[in-house]
Image: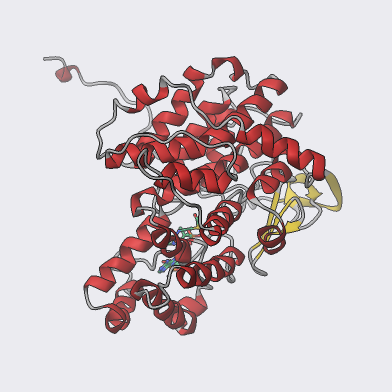
Amino acid sequence: MKLADNKATLSFSNGTPSVDLPVYQGNIGPDVIDIRKLYGQSGMFTYDPGFLSTASCQSGITYIDGDKGELLYRGYPIEQLATKADYLDTCYLLLKGELPDAKQRGDFHDLVLHHTMVHEQMQFFLRGFRRDAHPMAVLTGLVGALSAFYHDSTDINNAEHRDVAAIRLIAKMPTLVAMAYKYGIGQPFIYPRNDLSYAGNFLHMMFATPCEEYKVNPVIERAMDRIFTLHADHEQNASTSTVRLCGSSGTNPFAAIAAGVACLWGPAHGGANEACLNMLEDIQRQGGVAKVGQFMEQVKDKNSGVKLMGFGHRVYKNYDPRAKLMQETCDEVLGALGLENDPLFKLAKALEKIALEDDYFVQRKLYPNVDFYSGIVQRAIGIPVNLFTGIFTLARTVGWIAQLNEMISDPEYKIGRPRQLFTGSVRRDVPTSVKR
Ligand code: ACO
C-alpha cells in the first residue's frame, strides 16, 4: 500500500485528544483512511453497517468505477474481455493476474476441461435431496460436500492445495449445476464431454439425454460463455466478502466457497435475476405492457415494498456495463431462436424506457443492472428460472477463488472480526422466579 502525502486527523468535541490516521492511495479509486489503530488510541470503534464507506481489504483483481459505469478485471475493460476473450481466458486472468499466451491458454483449457467429472459417489449424496428442492439449496450442499469428496486439497495454507481446489471447483461447478437441474426434472445425469468448450459442455450436460445428443448452437454457446464472463467477479460484493470472511478462519476452500453460494442466493444479490424474471412474468400475467405504468406507481410507493428488480446497484450509479453487453446478447439470442417478438423482452424494454426517464429513478441514479436482461437470455436458452442463480454461482466461483487466494497470500490478512455498538440490556440478574 502506498502512503498518501496527507493524513487524516480525527478530533473530538469532548476534549479527547485528536488522533492522526494514515491515508493510503490505491492505483485508481478513492484513498482510504487506515483506522486500524483507532481503537487502541481512542477506545472507539467506527460504525458502518453495510460497509458504505469501509474498504475491507486491499485487492488487485477487479475495479469498478460506479459513476462512470466501468468494470475492469485486472485492468482490462469487461467490454473487451467479453468480445476478445472467453470465460476460461478470463478465469486464467483473474487467478493469475495476466491473460494467457497461446501455450498457457491451451494448457489451462486442457486442465479445466479434463477435471469436469465429479466423484461418482456425489450423485448418491445428491439423491438425498427432495426432487423439488431449490437448486441453490442443492448447490450449497453439493459445494460444501466437495470438501468431503476431495479432502486431499483442503489445506487453505498450502498453495498447491489452493491451486488444485481452484481447478476442481471451476471444472466441476458446471457438472454440479447440470446435475442439480437433471435431478429436479427426473432425468438421468449426463456425463461431461471433454471435447466440447466449457460453455458447450455445460449446455450438453443440461440438455442432452441418453436418447438424444444435444447439438450445441454456436450463438447459444457464445451467449452462455458471455454470461459466465460477465459474472466472473465483481470485487468486494456480499458473497465475495462472505467467502473472504469465512476463509479468514482458515477453513478449507470448498467450505469458504459454499458460504459464498449461500450468500449469493439472496434476492438482493444473485437471486435478483430469478426475482426479475418472476416480476416480468407477474406483470405479463396482469396485462403486460399496458400495466407497466401501474406497476411503476407501486415501485415508487415506499409502502408497497415493491422494487423494480434488476434495477439499482450499491456501486453503479450509472448503466451497469454488463447490462449493455447482456442486452446485446439478448438481441442476438432472441434473433437466432426466432423470438424477436418475445413479450417479456418487449415488457423489459418498456420498463427500462420508463425507468430511465422517470424522476424517481433519475434522481436516485437507478439504472439496469446485469440481471435485468440475463434472465430473458437464460429463459430463451431453456434454462428454468430457479436455476438462474445457480448459473451465476457457477460463473462467480472463479472470482471467489481468486479473491480468497489473494487474501490468504496477503501478509496483512487476519481473521475477520467486526466489532459492534451494543444496544442490548446492560448486566442484570436472572430472577429466581424463572426456576419452576
Ligand atoms: N426499485 C425501486 N427503488 C429502488 C431500487 C429498485 N430496484 N433500488 C434502490 N431503490 C431506491 C431505494 O428505495 C432508496 O430510496 P430512498 O433513497 O428514497 O430511500 C434508493 O433507491 C437507494 O437505494 P438503496 O436501497 O439505499 O441502495 P443499496 O445500495 O442499499 O441497494 C440494491 C442496492 C440492493 C441492489 C437495490 O438497488 C435493489 O434492491 N435492487 C433490486 C434488486 C437487484 O436488482 N439486485 C441485483 C444487484 S446486482 C447483482 O447482485 C448482480
Residue at the image position 42 percent from the left and 82 percent from the top: 354
The colouring scheme, among rainbow, by chain, secondary structure or one colour, is secondary structure
Residue lying farthest right?
A: 5
Residue at the image position 65 percent from the left and 25 percent from the top: 164
Residue lying farthest left?
A: 436
Nearer to us in this view, 55 or 91: 91
Q: Which corner quadrant holds the N terminus?
A: top right
Q: Position of residue 243 (x, y in %)?
A: 55, 36
Q: Position of residue 425 (x, y in %)?
A: 35, 34
Instruction: Relative to 421, say whether 67 is above or below.
Output: below
Instruction: Relative to 83, say whether 295 is above or below.
Output: below
Residue at the image position 47 percent from the left and 52 percent from the top: 215
Nearer to us in this view, 351 or 377: 377
Q: Is residue 418 visible?
A: no
Q: How many marks?
A: 0
Figure quadrant, ligand 1: bottom left
Examine the image and state in which quarter residue 407 appears: top right
Q: Is residue 21 visible?
A: yes
Nearer to us in this view, 122 or 284: 122
Instruction: Relative to 142, say whether 264 is above or below.
Output: below
Instruction: Relative to 325, say whether 295 is above or below.
Output: below
Q: Which corner quadrant holds the C terminus?
A: top left
Q: Position of residue 128 (x, y in %)?
A: 29, 25
Q: Position of residue 369 (x, y in %)?
A: 51, 64
Residue 84 is left or right of residue 423, and the answer is: right
